[in-house]
């Protein structure tokens, strides 16, 4: 798995990894962090759109503490695409890292929220529409982002064709005591796209040497047939020289039926307390 960046922030060693699937109708990749001392803080994916009907995200999740898995699919109309998968990991002592999951009931538009136990602070999360287990034409993500408190929210929908299924939300946390021992705390940043668009996009994060973005999320705000996620991933802030200066970039798209929408980007960042 290619390592694209590594740095130390206030004593915490951080790595950013990426890998591509190649062009596929249903791109899928599960990648492992090579160093067993590192645990995943967060991650995401970017489906490279071809200009055709579209290829849309169905899952971005921590398969384990050291594995990040993502899937996407074309829908009704063939449109194979490449997907770039990203994960952010940190060197952590045993017991300081926790992942919590929660699965919804089956629905056409399932939603779930995973909440961390007391003593842990949200640093990332993920979502999985479980349409492959329940069958049907497919359920597509429109939200994977921080929820209230120390929780992560996930939401998906069938699109044009009925396909009820469940969704699983994943919350990733670090212990409050561990963060305090490094003089760190977690802050949330949020930004909204400029206005409704068929392909809305937004970025969240600042080039601040006292802060480093470690994960993020997205939600399309649709009101018609639907706007779905196509990208939610870390991207370097242009024009900065500090290695920890990342932002979170998100994109959405309607599919076959026009539905201009806005999109919200979230970033979770470590900041020196």
Image (tube, rainbow, N blue to C red):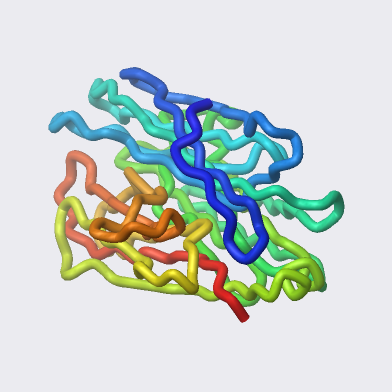
Instruction: Tell me if residue 133 comes above or below residue 253 in the rendering.
Output: above
**At 35% from the left edge and 69% from the top edge, which residue is drawn?**
206
Decide which of 207, 21 is in the foreground and name it: 207
Quadrant of the drawing holding the C terminus: bottom right
Q: Is residue 52 left or right of residue 183?
A: left
Q: Quadrant of residue 261?
A: bottom left
Q: At which x and y percent is residue 258?
A: 15, 50
Instruction: Tell me if residue 3 comes above or below residue 82 in the rendering.
Output: below
- Residue furthest to the front: 241
- Residue 218 appears in the rendering: no
Q: Is residue 188 left or right of residue 62?
A: left
- Residue furthest to the right: 95
Q: Is residue 48 left or right of residue 156?
A: left
Decide which of 73, 87 is in the foreground and name it: 87
**At 35% from the left edge and 50% from the top edge, which residue is drawn?**
235
Instruction: Tell me if residue 106 comes above or below residue 3 in the rendering.
Output: below
**At 58% from the left edge and 43% from the top edge, which residue is drawn?**
61
**At 82% from the left edge and 52% from the top edge, which residue is drawn?**
93
Decide which of 25, 239 is in the foreground and name it: 239
Q: At which x and y percent is residue 150?
A: 66, 71
Q: At which x and y percent is residue 24?
A: 35, 18
């Amino acid at each position: 798995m290619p390592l694209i960046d590594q740095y130390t922030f206030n004593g915490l060693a951080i790595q950013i990894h990426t890998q591509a699937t190649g062009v596929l109708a249903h791109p899928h990749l599960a990648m492992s962090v090579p160093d067993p001392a590192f645990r995943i803080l967060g991650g995401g994916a970017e489906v490279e759109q071809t200009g055709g009907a579209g290829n849309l995200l169905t899952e971005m999740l921590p398969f384990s503490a050291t594995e990040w898995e993502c899937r996407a699919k074309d829908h009704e109309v063939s449109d194979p695409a490449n997907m770039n998968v990203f994960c952010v990991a940190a060197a952590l002592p045993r017991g300081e890292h926790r992942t919590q999951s929660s699965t919804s009931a089956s629905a056409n538009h399932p939603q779930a929220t995973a909440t961390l136990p007391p003593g842990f602070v949200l640093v990332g999360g993920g979502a999985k529409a479980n349409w492959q287990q329940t069958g049907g034409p497919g359920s597509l993500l429109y939200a994977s982002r921080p929820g209230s408190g120390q929780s992560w929210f996930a939401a998906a929908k069938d699109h044009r064709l009925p396909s009820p299924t469940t969704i699983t939300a994943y919350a990733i946390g670090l212990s409050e005591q561990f963060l305090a021992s490094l003089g760190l705390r977690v802050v949330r940043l949020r930004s909204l796209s400029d206005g409704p668009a068929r392909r809305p996009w937004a970025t969240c994060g600042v080039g601040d040497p006292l802060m480093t973005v470690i994960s993020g999320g997205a939600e399309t705000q649709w009101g018609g047939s639907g706007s779905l996620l196509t990208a939610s991933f870390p991207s370097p802030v242009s024009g900065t020289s500090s290695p920890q200066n990342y932002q979170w970039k998100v994109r959405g798209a309607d599919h076959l039926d026009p539905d201009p929408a806005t999109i919200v980007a979230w970033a979770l960042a470590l900041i020196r307390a």
